[in-house]
Image: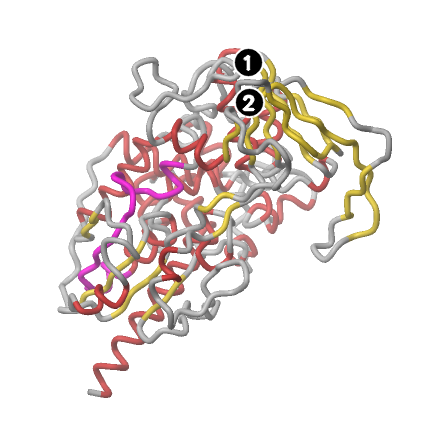
Amino acid sequence: MPNMSPKKVAMPEQDPKVRARNFEEVALGYTEEMAIEEAKRCLNCKHKPCVSGCPVNVKIPEFISLIAEGKFEDAYKKITETNSLPAVCGRVCPQETQCEERCVRAIKGESVAIGRLERFAADWVMNNTKLNFEKAPRNGKKVAVIGSGPAGLSCAGDLVKMGYDVTIFEAFHVAGGVLVYGIPEFRLPKSLVQKEIEGLLAQGVEIRTNMVIGKVLTIDEIFQEGYSAVFIGSGAGLPSFMNIPGENLNGVYSANEFLTRINLMKAYKEDSSTPIKRGKNVAVVGGGNVAMDAARSALRLGAEKVYIVYRRSEAEMPARLEEIHHAKEEGIIFKLLTNPTKILGDENGWVTGLECVEMELGEPDASGRRRPIAKSGSEHVLEVDTVIMAIGTSPNPLIRSTTPDLETNKWGCIMADPATGKTSKEGVFAGGDAVTGAATVILAMGAGKTAAKAIDEYIRSKEKAS
């Protein structure tokens, strides 16, 4: 019998006052009983609208039915038919605007908790079984993947299953891309990312770290090593700034640097070899998931007050509702309709305050959001000692500057066909944030899958032609 409760089974969480001072995971996950109860809310709709809302087309009703039957390992295997990183996606995907938004149960109540169930299946398998990954027969062709973030891992995962010898070239000393340097431990434990990557290694993917493409090797040199195709999934790691006075003061960080130091270098640990300034009063400028991550991380480093400074209203905030909710629970102060104009400092060059102006919303701009307009006479100062800029990122220029026949747009993003990932350079494909600018993990994974299919078709067509 289906469970006709209009509400999702609640997810157990750490108490806000406790979790605000530790880096352990906030959401604790479903028990087996909770997962089965929630899975029974799925109506197994004939037309499966949820699947069309998933960028990697996970067979959602099928894996949920298996959970309802208590077949947790089978559910995991069903997910991994199309999704290489279920433990990751179950935690960080914006399901509320994708699969869950299209769930029929959402018409008269809350949608089925698809993301929570995906997480449960992945966690259950990691905790209770030892998966044996079979290596597909090799076809003798090599494909290079630049970047080990969501796009690169997804592309590599699909290609290795097709029989290709896949090498991932990663700039950092640790694989995982934004999953390890950008998303905090309390949202995505790094041990889980490592386990997902180990699964790809077991299938035959090779990962070469400390390989800054454009410095160590160029794309042309990669082809000279015998690779038949190259996929660029190098992300968008170049931070943006507002270009206001005071951005060069001590105590001003890009969110990218701030989070990388914390997540990858473990700067929150007392014995860290790469410590970070622990601000007492911190302002984070921006309204996306990265801003929430930075603000909540600053709180966990010991800040007494942390402000989110955002020039529009909460309704326009691009961050996930869950992240905003968690930030508020933890005591983050939201300064909405507020825009920084200057960062103030002392005679020694350290931040002492953030000068701001109040805003009001006018007519919609090109993005469809109402344009913020400064209110005269509303200038004021937030007394802070740390400012973190979380207003967006763009692709690093290294690859495009060393690959002259690779077309990019005015923002530095690689021009690629969204249906195939093909670029202007023969044999080179691209996807994820390197193409779109900063976006979501699951969209990057979808682009990686799309490119893997197109790469396979490209290599096969060249074989036939020869």
Q: Nearer the viewer, residue 203 or 23?
A: 23
Residue position for label 2: 386
Residue 95 shows in the view: no
Place residue 226 in its image quadrant. bottom left
Q: Position of residue 399 (x, y in %)?
A: 36, 59
Q: Classify 10 Å Cα crowding around label 2: few (below 14), some (14-19), many (20 and above).
A: many
Relative to residue 421, is residue 466 drawn left or right? Answer: left
Q: Compared with residue 326, is residue 287 higher up or lower down, i.e. above or below?
A: below
Residue position for label 1: 280
Instruction: Check whether the beta carbons of the residues at disc 1 and disc 2 lie within 8 A of each other.
Output: yes
Place residue 403 in its image quadrant. bottom left
Q: Position of residue 156 (x, y in %)?
A: 28, 56
Write down the region rendered in magenta.
159-181
Q: Nearer the viewer, residue 21 or 390?
A: 390
Q: Compared with residue 374, is residue 448 higher up or lower down, i.e. above or below?
A: below
Instruction: State the residue at coordinates (19%, 87%).
Output: 466
Place residue 379 in its image quadrant. top right
| Circle 1 SS class | loop
Relative to residue 37, is residue 448 drawn left or right? Answer: left
Q: The disc labelled 1 sits on which kind of residue?
A: Lys
Q: Classify 10 Å Cα crowding around label 1: few (below 14), some (14-19), many (20 and above).
A: some
Instruction: State the residue at coordinates (17%, 60%).
Output: 136
Q: The disc labelled 2 sits on which kind of residue?
A: Thr
Q: Compared with residue 157, is residue 142 higher up or lower down, i.e. above or below?
A: below
Q: Position of residue 153 (x, y in %)?
A: 32, 51
| Circle 2 SS class | strand
